Structures are given as structure tokens and as C-alpha cells.
Image (cartoon, helix red, strand yellow):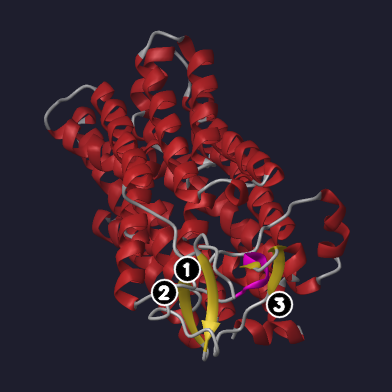
Amino acid sequence: GCTKPLSHSRMVQNGKMLSATSFADKSKLDIEDASIECEPMSPGVFTIEQDSLVAHEEVSPADQWRALATLATTMVLSMTTWLSASAVLPQLTARYGVSDTQGSFLTIVVQFGFIVGATASALLMLPDKFDATTICGVGAGGAAVANLFLLLPIGFGGAVVFRFMTGLALALVYPPGVKAMATWFQKGRGLALGFMVGALTLGSASPHFVRALAGSRGVDWRVVIACTSGLSMVGACIFKFVAKCGPFKPPPRVFTMRQLPLLLRNKALVAVTCAYLGHNWELYALWTWISAFTQSRLVAQGWDVDATEHYAAFAAFSVVGIGTVGCVVGGVLADRYGRTLVMIVSLVLSSICSVIIGPISEVSLPAFAVVALLWGFIAIMDSAQYSCAVTELCDPQLLGTAVTFQLAFGYILTVPTMYIVPYLSNYTPLHWTWAFSCLTPGTLLGIVATLYLRTLPESSKLQ
């Protein structure tokens, strides 16, 4: 008989997921029906090999959605520092005496920091060695502190350094946060991931909302930086003391460059990664520059410059924030009609919006508002589906490398357009009228890649 008390062990009884802490508690576990592997520890004493057990505790839907609500809310709070500099970019460029194009580096370096942090975290396998919510708490707290350094007289170079540190810390929030979500869901992860991406979207939009409120009261830009850091620190505390991982522990995702040749031979995986690259080519440039674009359009229509800051910030919050709904709708539609269809529809409509938004803004502000909101809704609607597609198309043994590869290259491709858009608007005859049209080649790449993906047999896994 197994008489030694067991640390939290999991096993299956008649196909159900059970948890046992001791064989002495026969009311919780029917030993005869349980599937157990034991090996001798000492004479007459045995233990269950936890690594050999693949089943887990039963989790009620109420517990799942309660956990998802906690994780998503905390994600919103923790991601507020991502675009905090973009929300007050005119004030920061004036403070440091740099152009809009140079000021774009305050957001670009966040992307680089995120890439470095996500890759390092994957190489060190941090989410597999430590509790995911603890890592998220550390990342959110680190981002809050790094963001606060913008309030100090550190110069433009110092600001760039600490924005890089902000991105580095945020890499410990989003990927581990998604993993924490996955520990609660074996089914319905597509929709749950849509909620998490929606939370990232709303968190990214929040600095613009704070700026809109501050602008309406003539409050200094420093309030925006302080508030976003404060919200992120609240998120860190919730991650640490309230949020927790569920019982469905995914297998470790190992990242190694030696696996890249195997990934590149997977045509379906390459196709979905190319589509993701096209998606990212567009997304962050839209999020970063929609506020400046809106303000320029209002000024061109004869609005007072000071008043336009408030309205532009509110418009940016609306355009980015409406993507939260788009993420959830995209998850529902993808589960019902297939991921590739959602990708194509989103990319096609985004292509159209990127071309027409400039000319329409010169003709009618109400029409511009409709196109901008549609674009914000559509541009992020397919985002979660690329990550889900990788998990469905990839060999499980290569999944860690595949996810890291997609994430790193996707965020690298956000950098060029975040620089190109303000350059076209300030230094070429295109101005703001056609500046966003430089995003169209990315979405066209995504469309071509997704159409090719649909011709492959593997695409049936995504339908």
C-alpha cells in the first residue's frame, strides 16, 4: 500500500480529472479504479510519478471564466505603459527638442526591448521554471518603474534607454500571461486568447484615454506617465497576490535555433508566419500614429491647435480600444467559420482602410471617423488567430521555437513602418493624405500568404 502522504498529485478516475493529496483519504479517491504508476522509494512505500500523469483536476466553467476575467483585467492594467510615450509624443518631442520622426524611437525601442525580452525568456525557459503569474507581476512592476523615469531630466538618450527597458519588462507580462490563461483552458482556448489579446489592446489604448481626460482639464503630460505607471503597478500586485495559474499545465516549450530548418520546411507554418508579418507591418504603425494623424486633420479643418490635442487623444483611444471588441468577435467567428477566412477578411478590409483614410479625412470628418473606427476594429480582429494557427500547424516538439520565431520576426517588422509613416508625412509630398498607404504592402503580403495557406492540405486543421 502507498502510505506516504503525497504532494499535490493528479490522476484519472473513470475518465474524470481528480486530485489526491493522500491515499489515506479514500473518500476523495477510488484506488481500484485509478490509473497509477508506482515505484519503490523504500521498503513498503511508493509514490505516484507526477510527470507520467497527463490528466488534471476538473475545473468548472465558472472557475475558468473567473480566472480569465482576472487575468484579462490585470493584463489591461499592466500593458498601459506600452504606448504611454506615444500618447504624449508631441509634448515629449518638444521637451527633448527632436522631430516627430526622431521621437518615434521612443515607441520603436519598446518593440526592440520586447523582442529581446521575449527571446531571452524563451531561451531561459522562464515561464516553465517559475510561476507564470509571478513572472507577470515582476514584468508589470518593472515596466511601471522604467516608465516613471520619463519624469526625470534624463535627456532624449536616457528616455530611449528606459523605453527599451519598458519593452524588456513587458516581455515578461504578455507571453507568460497567455500561458497562465492556457493553464485554465483545454477547450475554448481560441476565444480565451481573443480575450487576452483584447486586454492587451485595451491596455495599449488606455494612455490615450488618460491623455484625453487630462487634456480636457489642461493637466500636464506628466500625469499621463504617472497614471500609466500607477495602473501597471496595480496590475503587478494583482498578478502577484490574486491571479493564479490553473491545473492544465502545458508541456515546456523549448526554443533552439537548431529547429529553424525544420520549421522552414513546414509550408503551412511559413505561410501563416508571413501572414502574421504582414499583419504586424500595419498594426503598430496605426496605433502609434493615429493620434498625430487625427490632430493634423483637425488643424487642417481650422480647429484650434490646443483643443485638438484632447480630441485627437480621445479619437486614438476609440480607434485602438474598439479593437478589444474586434478581438473577441474575431475569436467567435474563427471558431465558427475558420481562422483563414477571418484572416483574409480582416486583411482585405485593412488594406482598403489604409488607402482611403487619408483622402476621406480631407472630405468629411464624420466619414473619417467611421473609417478610422472600422480600421481599428478590423486591424486587430485576426491577431489571436495567427498564434492559434501556429499551435495547430506545428509539431508539438517544435512549438517553442515556432512561437518565439513568429513573435520575434513579427515585432521586428513593426519597426520600419513606425518610422516610415511620420517620415512620409513630414518630408515628402504625400503628407498625411497618403502616409498610411505605406502599410498596404504588408496587408497584401498577408492576403497572398493566407490564400496560399488555404490551398495546402494542412489548412483543414484551421477550418
Q: Residue at x 39, y 64 (%)?
A: 195
Q: Which residue lies furthest to the left in this view?
A: 217
Task: Return the mark for residue 453.
Answer: 3
* Mark closer to the chain start, 3 or 1: 1
- Distance (Cα) linking label 2 and label 1: 6 Å
**Magenta stretch, residue numbers:** 49-54
Determine whether label 3 and label 2 are within 8 Å by CB.
Answer: no
In the picture of the structure, the residue carrying the numbered disc 1 is 22
* Residue 179 against residue 303 in the figure, above or below: below
* Residue 319 against residue 351 in the figure, above or below: above
Rendered image quadrant of residue 120:
top right
Tell me, yes or no, whether the highlighted magenta stretch contains residue 281. Answer: no
* Residue 344 against residue 162 in the figure, above or below: below
Hey, what amino acid is under mark 3?
Answer: Leu
Q: Which residue is drawn at 32% across and 39% down?
A: 237
Q: How many labels does the image show?
A: 3
Judge depth for marks 3 and 2 and give the one in front. Answer: 2
- Distance (Cα) linking label 3 and label 2: 53 Å
Q: Residue at x 72, y 59 (%)?
A: 402
Hey, what amino acid is under mark 1?
Answer: Ser
Q: Is residue 145 left or right of residue 410?
A: left
In the picture of the structure, the residue carrying the numbered disc 2 is 25
Determine whether label 2 and label 1 are within 8 Å by CB.
Answer: yes
Residue 328 or residue 284, whichever sits in front: 328
Query: Could you tell me residue 160's position as x and y percent?
Result: 52, 21
